[in-house]
Image (cartoon, coloured by chain):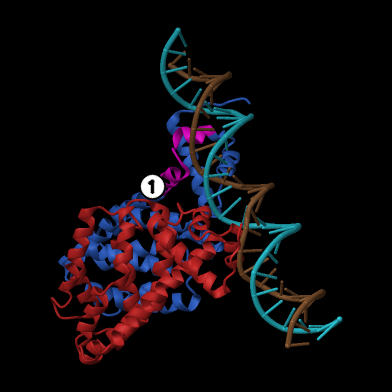
Chain colours: A red, B blue, C brown, D cyan
Amino acid sequence: MARTTKKPDIRRKEIIQAARGLFQTKEYDRTTMQELMDTLNIAKGTIYHYFSSKEDLLEAVVEDLVDEELRRKEQLMKSSQCRNLTALEKIRVLVTTDTMAEEHEQLLVNLHHPGNTLMHTRQLGRYLIKLAPIFAAVIEEGCDQGVFKTDHPLECAEFMLAGIQFLTDVGFYPWSETELARRMKAFPSLVEAQLHAPKGSFSFLAE
Amino acid sequence: MARTTKKPDIRRKEIIQAARGLFQTKEYDRTTMQELMDTLNIAKGTIYHYFSSKEDLLEAVVEDLVDEELRRKEQLMKSSQCRNLTALEKIRVLVTTDTMAEEHEQLLVNLHHPGNTLMHTRQLGRYLIKLAPIFAAVIEEGCDQGVFKTDHPLECAEFMLAGIQFLTDVGFYPWSETELARRMKAFPSLVEAQLHAPKGSFSFLAE
DNA sequence: TAAATAACGACCGACCGACGGTCAATAAAC
DNA sequence: GTTTATTGACCGTCGGTCGGTCGTTATTTA
């Protein structure tokens, strides 16, 4: 077959992008290396030239995903429209501008299939490591402004993000609609308690 | 080969028990049906006569695991030595008498292998559904006694259990020792904030 | 300077072993 | 005799391997 060589970093990125698309639409487990080969018109050996295993590839995909999210949120916080918001407003922006949510929706279509548990878990793990500090910074700001109060901003952020994500994401567990609704209703006051925030300040979470 | 027939419910339990042992010591992914067959001296078809797939078997194992835990905790709460403890003391008993922890330790030996992510996730999911209500009941008791304060006892329990478990269990993500230590130190005050509990009342968590 | 050659590494794809799962036959139980 | 628990040979699929090929670039040769 005709062979096209590309610069390694280009090819690597190509593979990651294609894999990311497949993993998100078809689920990780149900995506075969054969499909990835077909998508890219590439031989199997080429993929394994760049990634030592399917799971290694998953790791790269997740890193790509989370890093993108990180860049967006960082940029969001630095943007002029955010510069002089209160900490509470900033958190609202961070949460509601959930850029990753779109991609998640694709997943939710293939609901109830457990083939993406590994990917979800990995993603949440990396997400916490990389993005919790951003939330923590804003929380700290809030403490300075007197709206929040906590001795452990980072752990607080990790704790809330992990809890909410696990209890909300049907990719982890096939939660029922009623369970999800019940939790959504409770989250505002839970978060407010956690941060010692004014009553009602997080009611936007339930929307 | 000579064949020994057993009562279906006996056989079923046998398979679950053996699978449980293997899944916990060897990890789910790395446990093959062949190994399970060898352990039980049973043909493959027999297993598939009782369980439609490997994952179906996993589900049964997890249910077995969590139900056992549930029974123990329920019994613990009903026991005479717990009857007239304060809510705070009861929670301490619930948490420190973590019967499942032993089994987890086995897992921690095989550290950093992601082959059990699915099992861990499933387990936490079912655990929350079945055991959060027990914690919630005690929390409610604490509210009545005036040591706690929350409008959503159940969601509060789910939230804390999910968060702590995910951030603590290296079966989900290969957290570093420093990360784990850092979080353990923070948990008491996080939980106290969540429940509006007196300062220091949950310091036993960090031990 | 231009052509031949050597070295490198990106790329290929036939092949493999392992694994989950199937099913027709069969032995035990009732 | 009927039902049902059990067997194990067999299958398809999938992740992964590996010896080898071909395009590219640096180096030598004419």
**Label 1 is found on which chain of the structure?**
B
Q: For the point 36% across and 48% down, which residue is it?
A: B67
**Boundaries of the magenta span:** B45-64
Q: For the point 56% across and 53% down, which residue is it?
A: B26
Expressed as whole percent of the image width and height from the top left, the position of residue A179 reads 23, 56
Expressed as whole percent of the image width and height from the top left, the position of residue B111 reads 54, 64
Q: Residue furthest left?
A: A200
Q: For the point 61% across and 57% down, which residue is it?
A: A1
Is residue B58 within the magenta segment? yes
Expressed as whole percent of the image width and height from the top left, the position of residue B74 reads 31, 52
Residue C6 lies left or right of residue B182; in this view the side is: right
Is residue B53 within the magenta segment? yes
Residue located beneath label 1 in the image: B63
Element type at mark 1: helix
* Neighbour tally class for label 1: few under 14, some 14-19, many 20 plus, Cα within 10 Å: some
Where, quadrant-wise, is the C terminus of chain A in this rendering? Answer: bottom left
The answer to whether residue B183 of the structure is visible from this angle is no
